[in-house]
Amino acid sequence: MNHWLVVPVVLPAFAGPLIVLAMRHDLVLQRVFSTAATAAQLLLALWLLLQSMGGEIQVYRLGNWAAPFGIVLMLDRLAALMLVLAGVLGLVIQLYAIGSGWDRRGRHFHSLWQFQLMGINGAFLTGDAFNLFVLFEILLIASYGLMIHAGGELRLRAGVQYVVYNLLGSSLFLAALGTLYAVTGTLNMADMAARIALLPAEDTALLRVGAVLLMLVFAVKAALVPLHFWLPATYARAPGPVAALFAIMTKVGIYGIIRFFTLVFPSDDALMRLAADILLPAALVTLVVGQLGVLGARHMGRMTAFAALGSVGTVMVAVAQFQPAGLAAGIWYLVHSTLATAALFLAVDLIGTRRQGGSLWLRPAPPIVQAGIVAALYFAAAIAMAGLPPLSGFLGKLAVLQSVREGDLTALIWTVILVTSLFGIVGLTRAGSIVFWKAHEDGTPAPHPAEEPQPDAPGFPSAALALTSVGALIAAMVVLTVLAGPMMRFAQDTAAQLSDPQRYIEAVLERQEGVK
């Protein structure tokens, strides 16, 4: 067994409590220790990604207990890619939180950050459906604390809505797992897949109920319309770094849909058709609602939240086909959209911390500190979010469009994607014009950073670090564009691996030499 598979879960699980118990009165020590732990997780994720590129599915059995009775962790190309994505976001955004001063505006920021990464990493690695629920709850509990970090009435109100909505989703998750266990007698995903493949067609009615319930759960986590109501207010009111990390939270829901409907349920053709018939219309409506929200928003936080919603719809248009071409395009765009969403949230937060009074309402205001640099970062993130060349969003949208060209709804899907892209371009451009161009209409000069009063802002202990962190996410999308060929081949290999569930079943259930 590869014992490194458990470290992405164990490392933050130890780092979080240690920060609370031994470092709670020393912010500098918290920053150093937490950043080192996050960087170690990223390095380990890169190492696991290199291992996964050979195509072998690796399994770690906790306590060396045999599956399906023991807990298993499972690493394939998709899980490794998502670990790297979480590691990149976790490290870069944490550096931004330190540079912008957000981490000192409330208690236990860094410990909650580690617990959040623990839940995210574990969700990507687990091979057991109940442990997926447990890890979902861990990341959600940490996200509740991060959501209301720094306090405030509006943030607390949005946080309560977020908690209530996700508790309802968690209850539905338990009901779905109970239904699936009643049918299959197991919650190990590979074992569940093997048993479902042997079920007679006339005995699958309850199975389909459980599968649809599970799909609704992941649709809540992914914020697909009409289950998206929690997202705009939550993301708009969350602290900037927290909202940026939440960019991967919706992707955890998409990951769950991909994992279950390629590994556990693919043997039931009727169920797969039902899933596609539900998810594709929901994805198109999500895309429309998201981009209309960008176009109509009057607050930059809500505009970015709706842009995140639109990116979820684009990913799900590709994924909902459950075909190798669609999965490959969806994986590509998932990586891009996560980076672009995080970059846009951080760029908007830079604007808020530098604007007079910290306002993000779209109305003319005096010029902001370092307007040129912030404007460049905002427009780069906006270009990426809108899917314009030369950044990776353009290639990702082309891949999504190509993946649906053989389907029955090609004309409709192409029209929706292209028209909503125009909505997004107009909305993001309008916001940038109001913030950066109209600010100079009254002739007021931009203040010098040392002269600008910021009573409500978190302060600038290292403005260079904050700016560099946003630039790092833009640079990551440039790298993704330059390495488009290798990245697309990796996505295609990942889709091919996902389309062969028998390899997972063999790796988990059959190769168990030396277990208890």
Image (cartoon, rainbow, N blue to C red):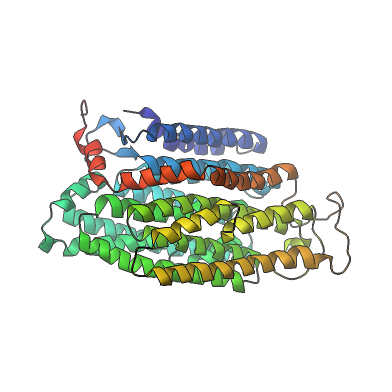
- Quadrant placement of the C terminus: top left
Q: Quick one: quadrant of the N terminus?
A: top left
Along the line of sight, the residue nearer the viewer: 147 or 122: 122
Point out residue 162 in the picture as x, y percentages from the top left corner. Answer: 49, 62
Residue 118 visible to an observer of this rendering: no
Query: Residue 67: x percent and y percent?
Result: 22, 38
User: Foreground residue, 463 or 456?
Assistant: 463
Question: Residue shown at 55%/34% (left/top)?
Answer: 39
Q: Residue at x 74, y 68 (%)?
A: 434
Q: Position of residue 403 (x, y in %)?
A: 40, 58
Left or right of 60 in this view: 512: left
Above or below, comparing residue 160 to residue 125 in the picture: below
- Residue at figure coordinates x 70%, y 64% from the top left: 432
Question: Is 166 positioned to the left or the right of 192 in the image?
Answer: right
Residue 99's quadrant in the figure?
A: top right
- Look at the picture and state if 294 lies above or below 15: below
19 relative to 160, above or below: above
Q: Is residue 176 above or below residue 475?
A: below
Residue placed most toward the observer, 341 or 104: 341
